């Protein structure tokens, strides 16, 4: 199933976390979200919200740029948080066993565009910096539940 891209403006960090929480509440085992955008775009902030939405403890969420993989065991769902930045472009990520991670929970990947994850039908989310705000766009809708949570109550730009 495909959807048109949907963009949302998050004026503050709090808004980005709240958006993540909405996503995290509907995320399910087997869902893969790929976050793209420059350093400081808010990818890790969004993951913090997602983990909270899945029932995990927000304080454990931090940038995995120097640690490839963090696991947040949520009350409802385990969230695997990957950051491929350090691996560089064209990375071979087979050693991460993303298929295995998807069997045990949802997977959210920062800098996922550096590797070929197309075999896992990811939901691609692009974050852009616009002054203090962040513009966050769903590129396609391979996880319709997440799109629905996104557009509900949302100020769509
Ligand atoms: N609207 C916003 N949404 C998210 N983060 C914001 C926003 N405004 C400012 N920030 C700041 O931007 C930074 C985003 O950092 P981070 O999430 O680590 O980025 P990334 O993981 O994309 O490199 C944080 O310091 C956060 O406080
Ligand atoms: Mg980050």
Image: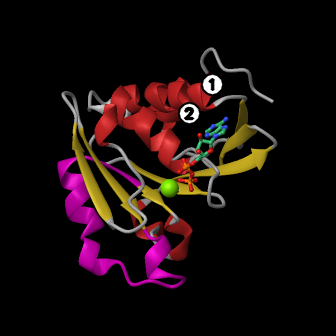
**Which residue: 37% across, 26% down?**
25
Name the residue carrying label 2. 147
Residue at the location (35% across, 36% down)? 51
Q: Quadrant of the C terminus?
A: top right
Identify the disc placed on residue 52: none
- Could you say whether the residue bearing mark 2 is in a helix, strand or loop? helix
Q: Quadrant of residue 113?
A: bottom right
Instruction: Please state the quadrant of the image where ligand 1 appears.
Output: top right
Q: Vertically, is 113 above or below 32?
A: below
Of 15 and 112, nearer the camera is 15
Q: Is residue 106 magenta?
A: yes
Q: Are marks 2 and 1 in contact (CB under 8 Å)?
A: yes
Q: Which residues are magenta?
A: 84-108
- Give the quadrant of residue 69: bottom left
The foreground one among 71 and 126 is: 71
- Quadrant of the snapshot with the N terminus: top right
Residue 80 in the image: state x and y as whole percent: 29, 52
* Whether the residue under disc 2 has CB within 8 Å of ligand 1: no
How dense is the environment of label 1, judged by Cα within 10 Å: few (below 14), some, or many (20 and up)? few
Q: In percent of the image, x 26 and y 32: which residue is there?
A: 56
The percent coordinates of residue 130 (x first, y second) are 81, 44
Nearer to us in this view, 26 or 42: 42
Magenta-colored stretch includes residue 128? no
Extreme residue toward the top, this view: 153
Residue under circle 1? 151
């Amino acid at each position: 199933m495909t959807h048109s891209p949907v963009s949302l403006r998050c004026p503050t960090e709090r808004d980005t976390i709240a958006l993540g929480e909405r996503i995290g509440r509907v995320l399910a085992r087997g869902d893969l979200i790929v976050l793209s955008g420059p350093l400081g775009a808010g990818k890790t902030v969004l993951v913090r919200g997602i983990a909270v939405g899945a029932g995990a403890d927000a304080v454990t969420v931090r940038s995995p740029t120097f640690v490839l993989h963090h696991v947040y065991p949520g009350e409802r769902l385990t969230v695997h948080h990957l950051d491929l930045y350090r691996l560089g472009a064209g990375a071979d990520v087979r050693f991460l066993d993303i298929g295995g991670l998807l069997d045990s929970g949802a997977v959210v990947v920062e800098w996922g565009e550096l590797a070929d994850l197309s075999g896992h039908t990811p939901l691609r989310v692009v974050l852009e910096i616009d002054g203090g705000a962040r513009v966050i766009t769903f590129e396609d809708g391979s996880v319709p539940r997440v799109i629905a949570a996104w557009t509900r109550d949302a100020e769509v730009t």
